[in-house]
Amino acid sequence: MSSSSSKVVLITGTSSGIGLAAAVAAAQAGWRVVATLRDTGRSGALRKAAGEAGVELDVRQLDVTDERSVAAAVDGVIADHGRLDAVINNAGAGHLGTLENESVADVRAVMEVNFFGVLHVSKAALPHLRATGGRLITVTSVGGIIGQPFNEAYCAAKFAVEGYMESLAPVAARLGVAVSVVEPGAVATEFVNNIGVDLAAEVAAAGPYADALQAYLDRTVAQFLNGAQTPAEAAGAVLEALTADRPAFRLQTSDWAREFTGTKLTDLDGSAVLGLTGGWVG
């Protein structure tokens, strides 16, 4: 599947981070990029990056949790561009919490964005991807392979996405659609800030979990400060899934991510994973 200005890709969650970087990189590779975000008022950084790169983006509104918004966006792409060759499901939201200290409604909200949002977009796009022999790419996380403390709901959503897409992949392939997932590790983006919580207040309210939460936060903040990829580096794996002749189903964005996920894939009894993540909470 060679890059061509005639090929159209729709990307969700492009206001910052990997989505923004992937939108610019795909446009530089010759794709017509429909860059979507929930609030187009937050498109300033995206438009600036496109201008600096000398590329044009078709910026549109799309809320992955609203089926009508998704349908309108996909229908609009077909009406204006006549085709859809690829979708990159990138929109998502972070979450911090543990079962005893949060409501089931909180968990449902995480699933709506990170799992059902992916399904809404993918379902609307698939008829058009079948018509073009296209690609369905979803940015998941290393947290979709290894469960991480105080990320139960987030990891559950990413596990669900991974399982859904792994199950869908051979079915879609029979009809000419290549399915891939891209698994970033720590990326220096606004994603952590977008969790939207006061970390000190969370620790103060954590009750018997306070010490473990503080240990987890100390470790995680240090990782993001000292070992995170740039969004452009992580977007390289997304571009590979978009442009490779035969894209892999599962791509990690760094050597660290490959090593980390590899721990799970060779851990038949779970002891290696729990030994690793247990150390994160003291």
Image (cartoon, rainbow, N blue to C red):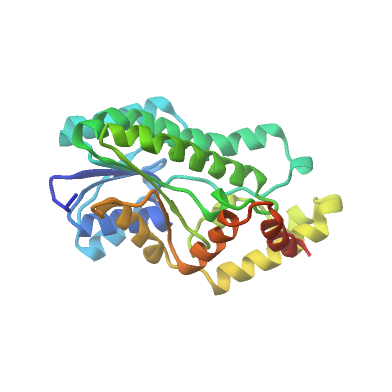
Q: In this view, does 96 lie to the left or right of 16?
A: right
Q: In the displayed orientation, state which residue is furthest to the right.
A: 208
Instruction: Write the residue at 65% across / 49% down.
Output: 151
Image coordinates for residue 174, horizontal then vertical, percent = 29, 33
| Residue 219 or residue 48, whichever sits in front | 219
Foreground residue among 193 and 186: 186
Q: In this view, does 114 lie above or below 241?
A: above
Mark count: 0
Identify the residue at image location x=57%, y=71%.
225
Q: Position of residue 263 (x, y in %)?
A: 59, 60
Residue 33 as seen in the image, left or right of residue 6: right
Classify residue 231 by image quadrant: bottom left
114 to the left or right of 208: left
Q: Quadrant of residue 53?
A: bottom left
Residue displayed at 42% across by 30% down:
120
Residue 19 place in picture, x, y as percent: 38, 52
Q: Which residue occupies 35% across, 52% down?
A: 248
Q: Which of 202 and 104 is in front in this view?
A: 104
71 or 276: nearer the eye? 276
Q: Give percent across and percent down for residue 38.
A: 41, 40
Quadrant (top left, top right, bottom left, bottom right) of the C terminus: bottom right
Q: Which residue lies furthest to the top in this view?
A: 68
